[in-house]
Amino acid sequence: MKTKWKFSPYLYILPAFFLLFAFRMIPIVMSFVISFFDWSIKGTGKFIGLENYAKMLSDDVFWQSLSNTFWLVIIVVPASIVFSLLFAVLLNQIKKLSGFFRTIYFLPFVTSLVAVSIVWKIIFNEQTGLANTFLGWFGIEAQKWLAEPTGIFNLILAPLGIELPGMLGGPSQALFAILIMTVWKGLGYNTIIYLAGLQNIPRVYYEAAEIDGAGKFKQFWKITLPLVSPTTFYVLIMTTITTFQAFSQVYLMTDKGGPLNTTKLIVYYIYEKGFDTLEMGYASAVALFLFVVILSLTVLQKRLEKHVNY
Amino acid sequence: MNEKLRMTLIYATLILCGLFMVVPFLWMISTSLMTQAEFNKHDSVFVPKEEYHVWDQGEQSRPVILVAREDKEAVIHLLDKDRKIVKEYVRVPTETVRKVKKVPSIHWENFRKAFQKVPFGTYFANTLYVSFLTLIGVLLTSMLAAYAFARMEFKGRDLFFYLFLSMMMVPEPVYLISSYVLLDKISWLDTYQALIIPWCVNIFTIFLFRQHFKSLPKELFESASMDGCSTFGMLWRIILPLSKSVIATATVFSIIGSWNSFMWPLVMTTRPELRVLQVGLSYFNQEASTQTTLLMAASTFSIVPILIIFFLAQKQIIASYAKAGLKD
């Protein structure tokens, strides 16, 4: 298409570009700059070179937040993928009520994280919460949930008298409660994405498999799983990115990432350092570290995708 | 496997998992309608119900509070219709006092009480204001940029487009602190524009619009151009009427996004009169942490508008998210 005035295309992208430049690019560069400063409250700071980065190495709380975050990602992502694929496969086979179930599964995704965090905080209350009522129906004793700093593997193994050291003890029960809620929140979205992916698989493959006498399970392993793998990679990357950024759950459900920092996640730690203790330079360094982690995981997963895809 | 059994198993699994998804909401609503005392007693999990005593006097019976019960006599407080105590420590024969149980009682006053404690009306209005202006901004900037990217040829077009897309890769926490410093420098902290202007550009929406504009037939533009329609006129007269569904999709994403955004407004505003719903709710969560029923009422209130939108257009909303996911 011919344009009458050669500058006009730039005018069309100008508003968007200006906002992106002012409120994304500049802050991103500033983040980088601030991370080299001892930048406390407002105003300018003192240049301290790589000191903030060096501090990260010896900061125990930083490492704990990081390992908490890794636990969250390592459990939430696979759990979310397995359950959402299961739901999608089941939903794909029914005709009646399919829309109804879709709506119900999607409900947590559209509601605000703040409101549902409050609800789940009360669900996991030791005395009056629904979680313990539910366990009570099966004769399981009440758990402390959000107040329990002991790792879940250690809690399970305790009757056998086994205690695993450090990270091997697993995420604390408090973090486990947050983990359940996080899976619940994102499940519906992934289910809908999978459902769309499943509907793109041509029926003829299944018909051919049926004629060859392949059972439903074999069809799932040999047809569904390989052909839906692009969707799996999309879900994997998106869920990893969003789980790494979990913040509101910690802010609303716990007392500053407690008990004993076992629910302190990396973004909460950035928030705390930036706005509670006002170490903005250090917080920026941690934020950039998080960015590098997320970016390298995304690149890694993209690489992997090229190897696996059919 | 038997087909009938298979279907039964599928439905059973779906119902069980469906329960897991909705039970928190049902519990939220039922708790928001209970009194705090009922909730603490914890014998009514889902249905708001009450347990109280009545005193039978011949034909009539009236609600009372049982203070003590002995073999022959019981001590009660007499109540009026509004359950206010009218007479204390009355001795009556024990057999005339009986327990009435499981009468559903709905306590709407939790909502009123939550509103009295916190100006949720203001928060609600702030959220609407911010969401609406952000939406207008997003639609305008996205439409213009996407039009250029999809339909015009210019130097550096792809470079600009990839630059835009790469910005999508940067998570919000990365630029949160520096944005705070930036907004402080331009004196925007604690203002509405801090909540609106930086979010008036949405790369994903630009991407969505560009895909759609590209899919429109070329002939449409050529004939319009011959009829003397200007480049900008085409956007209004040809593209806009043909983009209703993609605009609806972008609107849904934008509204849900602004409505639920939390970390940004939490950090960028401190003045109570600027609080949006999510921030107001989080402060209420700290202040009223023991008043479970009020917290649940406030949560219910904050979710309802989005739920109404969702139920009105759930098919389209779910389809939009599915489609948008596949495009990446």
Image (cartoon, coloured by chain):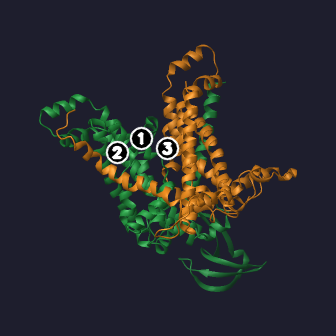
Chain colours: A orange, B green
What residue is pinned by disc 3? A103
Mark 3: which secondary structure? helix
Task: Evaluate if marks 1 and 2 touch, with contact meaning CB atoms under 8 Å apart.
Answer: yes
Please name the residue that numbered disc 2 is placed on.
Answer: B248
Q: Which residue type carries mark 1?
A: Ser
Q: Nearer the viewer, residue B217 or A5?
A: A5
Question: Which image quarter holds the C terminus of chain A?
Answer: top right
- Per the rendering, the mark at residue B12 is none
Residue, far right: A161
Disc 2 residue type? Ala
| Residue A86 in the image: above or below residue A144 | above
Could you say where residue A102 lies in the image, as x and y percent from the top left? 51, 41
Lower sequence index among marks 1 and 2: 2
Q: Alpha carbon of mark 1 to alpha carbon of mark 3: how far?
A: 13 Å
Specify whether A200 is left or right of A153. Answer: left
Tag 3: amino acid? Thr
Q: Can residue B24 be seen by looking at this rendering?
A: yes
**Could you tell me which residue is drawn at 56 percent across and 72 percent down?**
B287
Q: Nearer the viewer, residue B310 or A82?
A: A82
Q: Residues within 10 Å of mark 2 (few under 14, many from 20)?
A: some
Q: Which residue is mark 1?
A: B320
Viewed as shown, does residue B274 lie left or right of B30?
A: left
Q: Position of residue B66 (x, y in %)?
A: 68, 77
Classify the position of the N terminus of chain A by image quarter.
Answer: top left
Chain letter for the residue marked with disc 1 in the picture: B
Q: Is residue B51 above or below residue A134?
A: below
Does residue B219 lie above or below B315 as drawn?
above
Question: Is residue B269 shown left or right of residue A261?
Answer: left
Between residue B2 and residue A164, name the one nearer to us. A164
